[in-house]
Image (tube, rainbow, N blue to C red):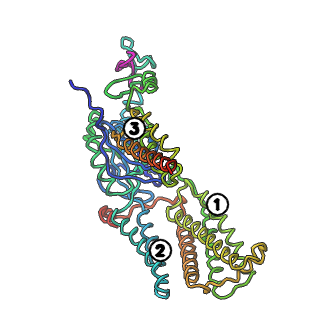
Amino acid sequence: MMLCSKCHTPVAGSAFNTKTLQPCGHCRALLQTEVFPAFYKDGNGILSNPTAAASNEAGCFYHPHKKAVVPCGRCGRFLCDLCDMAMEGGHFCPACLASGRKKNVFRNLENHRVLYDSIALGLALYPLLLFYLTLITAPIAIYTALRYWNAPGSIIRRTKIRYVAALIISAAQLGGWLTGVYFLLRD
Amino acid sequence: MGKPDTTATPYQRLPGKKRRFFGYERLWLGPDHLLLLRSHNYYEDYKRFYFKDIQALLLRKTSEGRIFNLICGILIGLCLLPTASLDKEIALIFWVMAAFFFLLLVINVLFGPTCACHLKTAVQTEKLAALGRLRKARKVINRLSPLIHAAQAGLNPPGSGGPAGDSSRRLPPPQPAALSQKTVKVTIHMLLFGLLLVLGLFWWSKFHQNQVVLALLEAVCYMTTGIIAIAALVRQGGTTLPALLKILTWITLILLVVQFFIGQFIGLLIIVKNPEIARNQWVLFKALAAVRPDDSPLMYHFQIISVGTAFGLGLCGLGAGLLGWTGIARPGRPKAAGPDPSPRRMEEA
């Protein structure tokens, strides 16, 4: 059921896929509703009522009374529509998917990444506001940049520019400190 | 077969970005899914919506943009009001403030009307905050629709003749009352705006007389308004109260906070001038009560703006409550006979 996002009442079917704003029948909020074939999937009973397995047909490993439609791509167990998890071009059972997620086999299941390049750059830049802090943070920034150079960064960008910038800025800060100490000792 | 290119990202950036205090939210187009990226500056969270799972995209035009324009317009007016009677140096400050608000107004107008976009799958409805502008949201939908239809090509219901099909037959008839809309009392908001009007009267009375009794009453009224404003803000969170009422409550709190800091600043000035009264709170309070708005032109105009804002907010808030913008479930209005209003005209509005 498609509900209005303001008043949570059902949106009339006549308002679907009109490409224009239509007033909600209840709250009059202007809505544009784009509905896709998957919306009717449950109504057709594809997912909600998997075909029952006949006596001479293979049943699902997890639901023996339901007809198997595909084997798992890793363990080979027979799976029904409900248990079939399509991922990166293959079909997997829930157990293999869970273990694959733990082992980082499926890239598309990754939902969190730490951005070490941004951390290194932040460590190199922000302490410049209080210059004395750079004596501590510059080595940390260099360590972070080198330690995590090969760690996966953001999923949407692949450059090392932040690491490079962090290294250059931190090296310049350390160079400044060394120069200062040199002149201090010389005088 | 060559080695797969691991340096190129498979994602394409989609229009729209929602900035937050720490990070942002943005949509990316993947080969078979839509990626919702929530950046928190030093880490990122991802949500993937596979094209084959997306059931619907729902756009709702919102009034945030218009409310923002209204607020900017009022602030410009309030900044320009005192410039005629002020010294050039002080008037310049107000001109700069007015120019700033005008710039915000122009930017907001250029971005176009605002909207809320929701993505529905079989198990969830996710708000896509990145699509906050109608124009950009439509661009994204136009780009996604063919991809989603292609991914769901085998799912067309038999005999439907297309994705739109005869959907009205499948849906249960619309119910007269909202399903999950709860009755929200706005008593506390009405009380807040009523008190704000009283507070405005107290501030207005400062132009005519400075009595300690009045100052005491004003202080009590001020503190009560502050407490009720916080209570109203707590109460309105996650409710179906209209955006206007929520925004007015926030502006009320901002006004009270600004007044508090101005009061603290004046108190500090009095202490600097007369350090001996710093230890006696009652004497300090009396000295504060004796301060007249016309002691300095800046304070005079600030007091006028405060009184105007208090009355404006109070009246708008009470009006919003009394006119039925209360978020309480209203009976469904039947559609007027005759042709439906033109959607294009409504969009232009």
Say whether disc 1 or disc 2 marks the residue closer to the N-terminus.
2
Q: Position of residue B167 (x, y in %)?
A: 34, 44
> Which stretch appears magenta?
A67-82
Instruction: Tell me the SS state at disc 3.
Output: loop
Q: Amino acid at mark 3?
A: Gly
In the image, B245 versus B221, the foreground residue is B221
Q: Position of residue A146 (x, y in %)?
A: 42, 35
Residue lying at the far left of the rendered structure: B1
The quadrant of the rendering that contains the N terminus of chain B is: top left
Depth-wise, is mark 2 or mark 3 nearer the camera?
3
* Residue B252 falls inside the magenta stretch: no
Q: Amino acid at mark 2?
A: Leu
Label 2: chain? B
- Tell me: B306 left or right of A143: right
Residue indicated by mark 3: A153
Q: Which mark is residue B231?
A: 1
- In which image quadrant can residue B186 be found? bottom right
Answer above or below: position of B67 versus A8. below
Instruction: Tell me the SS state at disc 1.
Output: helix
Residue lying at the far top of the rendered structure: A56
Q: Disc 1 to disc 2, how far (Cα)?
A: 26 Å
Observer able to see residue A38: yes
Q: Is the Cβ of the residue at disc 1 closer than 8 Å to that at disc 3? A: no
In the image, A115 versus A183, the foreground residue is A183
Label 1: chain? B
Answer above or below: position of A186 versus B50. below
User: Which residue shows up at 61% across the image and 61% down it?
Assistant: B232
Q: Amino acid at mark 1?
A: Ala
The residue carrying pointer 1 sits among few (fewer than 14), some (14 to 19) or many (20 or more) residues within 10 Å by Cα, namely some
Residue indicated by mark 2: B75
- In which image quadrant can residue B31 be found? top left
User: Which residue shows up at 38% across the image and 52% down it?
Assistant: B17
